[in-house]
Amino acid sequence: MIRILLADDHALIREGLRHILRESADFKVVGEAADAASTIALVRTTDAHILILDLSMPGRNGVEMIRQIKIMHPGIHILVLTMHGEHQYAVRAFKAGASGYLTKESAGTELVSALTKIAGGGVYMSLAIAERFARNLHEPLETLPHQRLSDREFDVFRRITAGETIGEIAEHLCVSTKTISTYKARILEKMQLPHGAALVRYAIRHKLFEDNDES
C-alpha cells in the first residue's frame, strides 16, 4: 500500500484527489494539509511514501518547500500537481528534489501512472510539460536575466507580471510589503530592468508564463 499525503489549499482539489485514489487499491491517503506550515508539520509527523504538492499554497514558495522537505525527509517522493504549466517551474521543481510534475488539467489516469512510477523510484513528467521542454531546447546556453533569480524572486516576478499588487503578494507569501518591495528591487537589479512594466514586457517577449503569451 502506497501511503499518500495531499497538500493543496483548495478543499475541492483534495476531495477530487481522494476520489481518484480511492478507485485504486494501491493507494491510501494518510494526511492532508492546506498551507505551507501545516504541510511541513504533516511531513514531519506522518509516515508516507509520496507527497502530492501544490506549488501555490499560502505561506511559502512551493519550490522552497520542496527543498526544505527533501532536507527534512529525504526518503519521501514529491509529485508536484499545479496550475503552472511553464517549463521554468518544472525545471526548478526537479532541481529542488521533486520526482514528478503534473498540471491540474491532467487526467486521473495520468495521476495514477505518475504515482505508480514515482513509488517505484522513477521520475514522471507529463507529456504537456515534456513538449514545453522540447520547444525550449533552442534557448541560448548563456544565463538569461530571469535565470539569475532565486526561487522566491522568480515567484515574485511571476506574480508581478500577473498583475498582483505588492500587498497581494505579501499577503499570499505571509511577509511584509516592505519585504516584497525589497524583492522587487532586487529582481529589477538582477535583470537590469528599470521598472515593473519592463518586467511584464520581458515576460511576454520570452514567453515565460502562459498568461502572458501573445496569441
Image: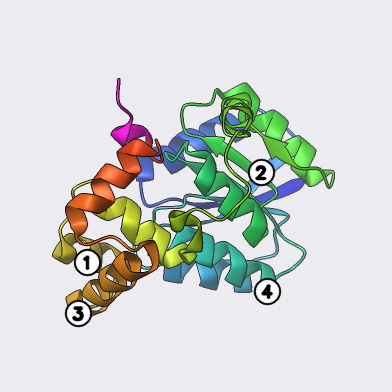
Residue 5 visible within the image? no
Residue 147 location (% of width, % of height): 50, 57
Q: Is residue 215 left or right of residue 16?
A: left
Residue 211 within the magenta-colored segment of the rendering: yes
Tell me the quarter of the image containing the N terminus.
top right
Secondary element under disc 3, as helix, strand or loop, is helix
Q: Residues within 10 Å of mark 2 (few under 14, many from 20)?
A: many
Amino acid type at image mark 2: Gly
Q: Which mark is residue 178?
A: 3
Judged from this view, the residue extending furthest toward the right is 120
For the residues labelled 2 and 3, the Cα–Cα distance comes to 34 Å
Residue 27 within the magenta-colored segment of the rendering: no
Q: Residues within 10 Å of mark 4 (few under 14, many from 20)?
A: few
* Image position of 105 with respect to 61: above or below: above
Instruction: Using the image as rendered, state which of residue 43 and residue 179 is in the foreground.
Output: 179
For the residues labelled 1 and 2, the Cα–Cα distance comes to 28 Å
Amino acid type at image mark 3: Lys
Residue underneath mark 1? 171
Tell me which segment is drawn in magenta: 210-215
Residue 140 location (% of width, % of height): 59, 43
Say which label, 4 or 3, has the lower sequence index: 4
Q: Residues within 10 Å of mark 1 (few under 14, many from 20)?
A: some
Residue underneath mark 4? 71
The mark lying in front, picked from 1 and 3, is 3
Residue underneath mark 2? 100
Residue 136 location (% of width, % of height): 57, 33
For the residues labelled 4 and 3, the Cα–Cα distance comes to 29 Å
